[in-house]
Image (spheres, rainbow, N blue to C red):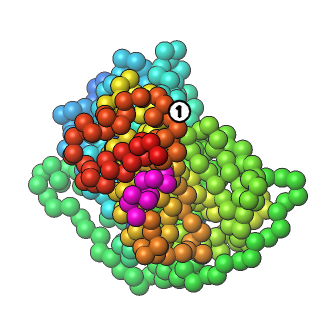
Amino acid sequence: MAVLDGDANEIVIRVVYDGPPEAGKTTSLRALSSSLAQRAVSPEEGGDGRTLWFDWMEYVGGRYEGCRIRCQIVSVPGQPGLAERRRLLLAGADVVVCVADSTPAAWGRSLAHLTTLQADLAGATPPLGVVLQVNKRDVLDAVCLDDVRALMVGQRAAVGVVESIAADGTGIREAFIYAVRLALDRVRELMIRSELHSGPPDIASADELLAYLRGREAGARAPRVESSEASVAASLLHEVLAVEAAAGRAPPGPPAPGSAPRPPDAAVPSGAIWPPVEGRAILYEVSQQGLMPRQLSSGDWAAGLGSGWRVVSCRDAQYASLDLGRAALIQWARLHALSLAVISPRRCIVVADGGDGWRLWQIVHAEESLRDLLQQALREPSADAAAYRLCQTAQLLLDADRKLSHAPCALTCSIDSVGATDGVAVYIGLMPDAGAVVEPHPEIRASPPALLRMQLGPLVQRDLAERHQGLSSALARVPRRFVHSDTILATLSGLLRPD
């Protein structure tokens, strides 16, 4: 529903608060209204004070590429019987704050609601960001926040997590600010695609929204905003994007003596992160880890040790201005977009103010590598189980080699740079500098047997053979269900054969 209102020189976005019944949606919006000194409206509440239609608040604050930011803030009714009203309100969202009740008795229902919400938003293009506002943190036995974050990572959900106590306003403003940043990231993506509508918003007040919902329930058609590119504000934003795309790269500036650059945090501006919505959720999660960059012998900066994330900035990935950093980001984003079929999904790239200039960072989730799978084979209780695990690892390695040969740049195929996501081989390492990309040369790739001997040989001959004395005969019993079974079994058997 985001629109560029050229006459008012405003970007209008809608932040929708969703969640299961009595999780704290209305309380959150009223706490936010108090924090922002704005009036909240709740038309026709029920006798028990529960929301029947929606809660509404407007807030104008901050600027986006010279335009004021007007936020329409809406909460949905939680009662199951009002699901159609909820659906209509979600359809107009630019970002959703999912308020979850973190008390043990209600946590399961909150998780189920989040799953439903993600399904409801699955078809949005560009995707809508979701902030999980974990509410009622003042309850002594509330679910552990680390468990919540681990669950989001395990589900591969692009969801940012913020704690709150809506009753006293704790965390409410932080969740809202985060949501606005996600919405503006999506606005930028709409601008790039030339899909951002121009003109006044179709719904500009609580009364108009109420009339719209009543009309839909009576069978009336929804109002529609027509796109227009004639406004001065629209032309200005297109010009800004064009300048960023054409900007060149600046030479790296001198490092600040004796100090590390500031790590990226959730406050990076719109247009400085890719992918724009999922990346913001990743960045928010990572920034909660208390990153401490340290310089490697190569001159690169790295952070995130022990956090489950790799946060790395190349030595020369430093820029004199945000515009120059964004130009580099565009090049890296293109390289990542062309490589989506072969790289692991939980990653983003960010341009952040490092204190000594703007610095580009890669953030990559530390996925399980093929070396880790081989270590699991070492721990298998039987030679047959170890042999099967070994063949499975070999198959993934050869699958990755085939896929990486078609990548837009040369990516290393090794047991450390390749892992598996949902049983599919993916590249889990860092991407090369987009300014110095080397194209892959299939003619110089190692043959499948040579690749297996080079990558698996040392572990097979030294560790696995010692741990499982009957490994050679167990390989002969492995079912030939792998695509490269003949090559794999012949090569692995050769590695175990005495000279």
Instruction: Tell me the residue at 83%/52% (across/down).
Output: 259
Above or below, 439 against 277 in this view is below
Residue 117, given in percent of the width and then of the height, sits at 30, 42
Instruction: Tell me the residue at 59%/69% (across/down).
Output: 433
Residue 469, given in percent of the width and then of the height, sits at 41, 28
- Label 1 amino acid? Glu
Q: Is residue 436 visible?
A: yes
Placement of the N terminus among the 4 image quadrants = bottom left
Residue 454 shown left or right of residue 35 in the figure? left
Residue 469 shown left or right of residue 357 in the figure? left
Above or below, 440 against 415 in this view is below
Q: Is residue 153 visible?
A: no
The image quadrant of residue 5 is bottom left
Q: Circle 1: is it few (<14), some (14-19), or many (20+) Cα within 10 Å? A: many
Instruction: Count all numbered tags in the image, as a single digit.
Output: 1
Magenta-tinted stretch: 447-455
Residue 336, given in percent of the width and then of the height, sits at 47, 65
Residue 150, given in percent of the width and then of the height, sits at 47, 33
Looking at the image, which is closer to me, 477 or 416? 477
Q: Which residue is mark 1?
A: 163
